[in-house]
Image (spheres, grey):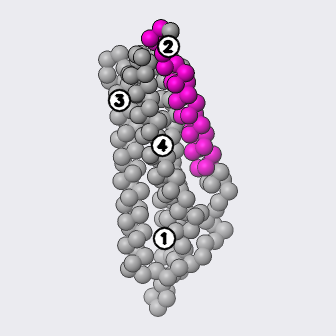
């Protein structure tokens, strides 16, 4: 078997794995977005300093993941665009093209999940501000799955996107050379 084909089956398996991960991540995100609505109402919870700090930490973590995802997505594309002959290496065969596109889209789904998550949290804060009662401060439960699932999706998509990006580069640089 020629060296260039030695890991062809493995590389196709990794491409299929990448495509399956992409489909699953997109289905979860799009299904949740299409089937849930915060305008239908969310149970209220008491608002206090502990809850406020917890929300602040979670929003900070989501923001940090968003920034890292932007950097990794930019780095993935930057390597392909800026490095001499990298585009030819990554885009030479269909397996790596599939993996690269899947990695990019999974990372973009992480960014989309962040946007949905922060929109929904800010919406809940907006409503809480409109109905605020000093004696009994309440707000919508931002830990409700209708909102929180998008934070979870963002985290999972980030990790899976990084994994598929790594697999793409390993396949293009190591496995293809056999």
Comes first in the chain, label 1 or label 3: 3
Comes first in the chain, label 1 or label 2: 2
Q: Secondary structure at mark 1?
A: helix
Q: Which residue is mark 4?
A: 160
Please tell me how crowded label 1 is: few (under 14), some (14-19), or many (20+) other residues with Cα within 10 Å. Answer: some
> Residue 120 in the image: x percent, y percent?
53, 62
Comes first in the chain, label 2 or label 4: 2
Q: Distance of mark 3 from mark 4, alpha carbons?
A: 19 Å
Q: Distance of mark 1 from mark 3, alpha carbons?
A: 37 Å
> Residue 55 in the image: x percent, y percent?
42, 69
> Residue 168 in the image: x percent, y percent?
44, 29
Comes first in the chain, label 3 or label 4: 3
Tell me the mark number nearer the camera, choosing from 2 and 3: 2
Query: What residue is drawn where x is 48% and y is 43%?
Result: 160
Please tell me how crowded label 4 is: few (under 14), some (14-19), or many (20+) other residues with Cα within 10 Å. Answer: many
Q: Identify the mark at residue 139; answer none if there is no mark.
A: none
Q: Please, is residue 111 above or below residue 96 in the view?
A: below
Q: Please, is residue 83 above or below residue 19 in the view?
A: above
Figure label count:
4
Q: Residue furthest front?
A: 1
Comes first in the chain, label 2 or label 3: 2
Q: Which residue is mark 2?
A: 5
Q: Identify the mark at residue 125; answer none if there is no mark.
A: 1
Q: Which residue is mark 3?
A: 78
Q: Residue furthest top?
A: 2
Q: Secondary structure at mark 4?
A: helix
Q: Secondary structure at mark 2?
A: helix
Q: Distance of mark 1 from mark 4, alpha carbons?
A: 30 Å
Query: What residue is drawn where x is 64% and y is 62%?
Result: 37
- What kind of secondary structure does the magenta stretch mostly adopt? helix
Magenta-tinted stretch: 2-30
Query: What residue is drawn where x is 44% and y is 25%?
Result: 171
């Amino acid at each position: 078997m020629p060296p260039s084909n030695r890991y062809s089956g493995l590389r196709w398996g990794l491409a299929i794995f990448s495509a399956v991960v992409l489909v699953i991540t997109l289905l979860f995100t799009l299904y949740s977005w299409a089937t849930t609505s915060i305008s239908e109402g969310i149970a209220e919870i008491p608002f206090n300093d502990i809850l406020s700090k917890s929300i602040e930490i979670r929003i900070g973590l989501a923001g940090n993941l968003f920034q890292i995802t932007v950097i990794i997505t930019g780095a993935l594309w930057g390597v392909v665009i800026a490095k001499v002959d990298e585009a030819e290496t990554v885009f030479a065969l269909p397996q790596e093209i599939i993996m690269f596109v899947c990695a990019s889209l999974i990372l973009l789904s992480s960014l989309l999940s962040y946007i949905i998550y922060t929109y929904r949290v800010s919406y809940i804060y907006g409503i809480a501000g409109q109905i605020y009662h000093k004696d009994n401060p309440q707000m919508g439960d931002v830990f409700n799955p209708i909102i929180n699932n998008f934070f979870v999706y963002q985290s999972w998509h980030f990790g899976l996107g990084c994994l598929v990006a790594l697999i793409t580069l390993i396949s293009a640089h190591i496995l293809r050379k056999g």
